Amino acid sequence: MADSLPTSARVVVIGGGAMGCSTLYHLAKMGCDDAVLLERAELTSGTTWHSAAQVRALRSTENLTRLIKDSIALYTGLEAETGQSTGWSQSGSLSLATSADRFTHIKRQAALSRAFGLEAHVLGPAEAAALWPLMRADDVIGAVYSPGDGRVNPSDLCAALVKGAKTQGAKVFEHTPVTGFDIRNGRVRGVETAQGRIDCDAVVLTAGLWSRAVGALAGVSVPLYACEHFYLLTKPIDGIDGHLPTLGDHDGYLYIRDDVGGLLVGCFEPEGKALPLDALPKDFSFDLLNEDWDHFEPMMLNALHRIPALETAEARTLLNGPESFTPDGSPLMGESPEVGGFFLGCGMNSMGVATSGGAGKALAHWVLDGHPEFDLWPVDIRRFAPFHADEESLRARVPEVLGDHYAIHYPGAEPETARNIRLGPLHQRLEAQGAVFGQRMGWERADWFDPSGDRARSPQFGKPAWHNLIAAEHRAARETAALFDQTSFGKLLVEGADAETVLQRLCANDMAVAPGQIVYSGMLNDRGGYESDFTVTRMADDRYLIVTGTAQPIRDLHWISGHLESNERVTVTDVSGDMAVLSLMGPRARDVLSGLTDADIGNDAFPFYTSQEIATDAGTVRANRLSYVGELGWELYVPNAIARAVYDALQAVGAEFGMQDAGTYALTSLRLEKAFRAFGHELTTDETPLDAGLRFATKLDSDIPFLGRDALLRQRDAGPVKRLFVFTVDDSDVFLIGNEPVLLNGEVLGQLTSVGYGHTLGRSVALGYMRLRGNTATDMAVETGYTLDLAGDTVPVSVSLRAAYDPTGSRMRD
């Protein structure tokens, strides 16, 4: 290790586990030769050293899978580069199914694997047993074998990463705990340690389960919490010779692999044990928690059932080590919106060794280039708000997250813990109407309404239990009127003399409109990809209201604030909680709204995509005429103080016209029939307006400059390589799960991005991208023979560039 602490460094990495060592290695490989890693104790002394170190490539999205593929590529070649073994073994993995739903689940994983370029084979019970002779297979109905998966030795891996990093000029300091940070003008400028101070341009927090405490020293919210994690190690067992595939018996909550001639039997039990940090000694390092055989016993019984040889095996130890988990089970990465230059790479949810090779590379790009190489919104720290780091909520949620690690991912599943954090002013009204709530960004949102009062979800594959309830809400929006509570929308107020200048530069569409006009626009990065999309209402010459997705206000505020020039007279304020939003949609919406106001809301007086303040019997509200369902409608922005009165008045008038409360599931169904895009699904940093078919929502054909314009011009001249399409399933009895691969003549061309059931169409409808392969999008749309891979089943599907319902948009403009 280096002898003396430097006084300055470009980047300081905090934490010497797999994630920290990988980030340091990639920073150095990318030319940052003055990166420094600080470890409070010794390298790998936190959670890395006791990791089971499985490396399974498939994740829920192609980009998250890419992180693991990058890990595998790194672990495979690192020994040749450094001369230090990593212990990498490509032994594969074998996932078992002992129930029909589990078999659907793993066959869906196999389909995704093949779509993402991974090898995967669906096996019968006998074939699975041949790969794992010690396994009991009489209750197995199928399996998936992934030969490209493997394992690594975590301590050797970190040694190789550090050796490679130091060769490139990086430095490592053990026994150097961080004691504080120098934060000036909203950016990190230095790190204080027990051995001295280091001035720096950026910090990367990779301190594992200690990251929440370290982040707090800088005023950075880090929503993670520790749980106890168990695995059993046995002495050698007859019949284990060499490496076997890692066995996933997820119906039994188990993973099992060979270990030095014996077995390692680990679990993600249905209910984890939260672990407060103050329960650990201050010098906790290479230590373990107490064995808890009572807690492990149900998993042990499952293991004895699966591997009968365990009955006579001799246990070496029941290892119990801490692991950190996040509220949604995905890592925390990217720049903190609270402190500039402060990056996170933590909360790995017991997947740190598998993820760290690729995640460290992505994070190094993020630090040095200002953005990752590809979209990583599912792990971006900006998907959380500061309140998500509340200790009480985390302590309630993370045991559930651990317990869901091996859960079957049914459409419509929702967490049960840490609920009712953000309640809109209409929550009690909606609850009385039979609302079944889901949670998004802490908000409780009505997913659908059940007048019977039965709020059970009971998610499943195929036709959902709530199908008919959604159909009724959908029909109300199409035939009479529907009322959606969309209070959870993010709302940003942009004010100041330079508001138009700033938004004109950052938004792809033209912001130089008259007060009272509404503009739909994206904010693009310099590669032309979407950083967000929203509607913008110009309220006055110097004031705009941005209305964005529920999950996006932290991200959008961070993006806009980070692109302000020092002399620009602009303030950006998050006013998301200041007002309720009621969306009144449907062909009778004008009749309902007319019952509340004397204002002229006819087409001539109140055109589409305009905004007015109107007086109602309950008080003044802002009414925006637009629609996300494809019908006549208004979004009403209502001060919280009068929200209940406005809602009650709408209900009283709406009853005459058949108005019905409706939730987010009906909204999704309606918007998919209209092919309306959604951020995080159709619109990400990897997709441009030309890919998404949204060129009309840009000022590209003008000479007005905006961020991303040059990239769009280059793409326009070269031609796009992919395009968004509308997919309708030919069989009305087929219900999609989501992310299904799209095939033509057996070749995977793309993947679905949003799915739902179109109740007007009477069949499933989806959006998704396909590679154009040198063809035009129009030529692709007239091809026939497209299919979806629905958990191994071939599903015929029709393809179009136009919305399946009212493609001209006339209904919402009448």
Image (tube, rainbow, N blue to C red):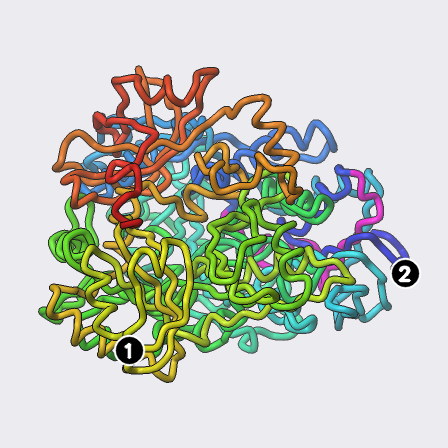
Question: What is the CA distance from the residue labelled 2 to the residue labelled 1?
Answer: 61 Å
Nearer to us of marks 2 and 1 is 1
Q: Specify whether 737 is left or right of 31.
A: left
Q: Secondary structure at mark 2?
A: loop
Quickly name the residue at label 1: 646
Q: What residue is drawn where x is 46% and y is 17%?
A: 773
Q: Is residue 416 visible?
A: no
Q: Specify whether 179 is left or right of 265.
A: right
Q: Quick one: 481 or 600, which is closer to the camera?
A: 600
Q: Is residue 339 magenta?
A: no
Q: Quick one: 234 or 497, which is closer to the camera?
A: 497
Tag on residue 449?
none
Q: What residue is drawn where x is 46% and y is 58%?
A: 548
Q: Secondary structure at mark 1?
A: helix
Quickly name the residue at label 2: 7
Q: Specify whether 464 is left or right of 714.
A: left
Number of marks: 2
Prevailing SS of the magenta stretch: loop
Residue 111 image offset from top left, x and y in percent: 33, 31
Q: Compared to 595, does 370 lie above or below?
A: above
Amino acid bearing label 2: Thr
Magenta range: 31-52
Q: Is residue 41 magenta?
A: yes
Q: Compared to 774, does 713 lie above or below?
A: below
Q: Compared to 22, does 328 lie above or below?
A: below
Residue 475 image offset from top left, x and y in percent: 15, 53
Q: What residue is drawn where x is 31% and y is 56%?
A: 603
Contact check, label 2 and label 1, Cβ < 8 Å: no
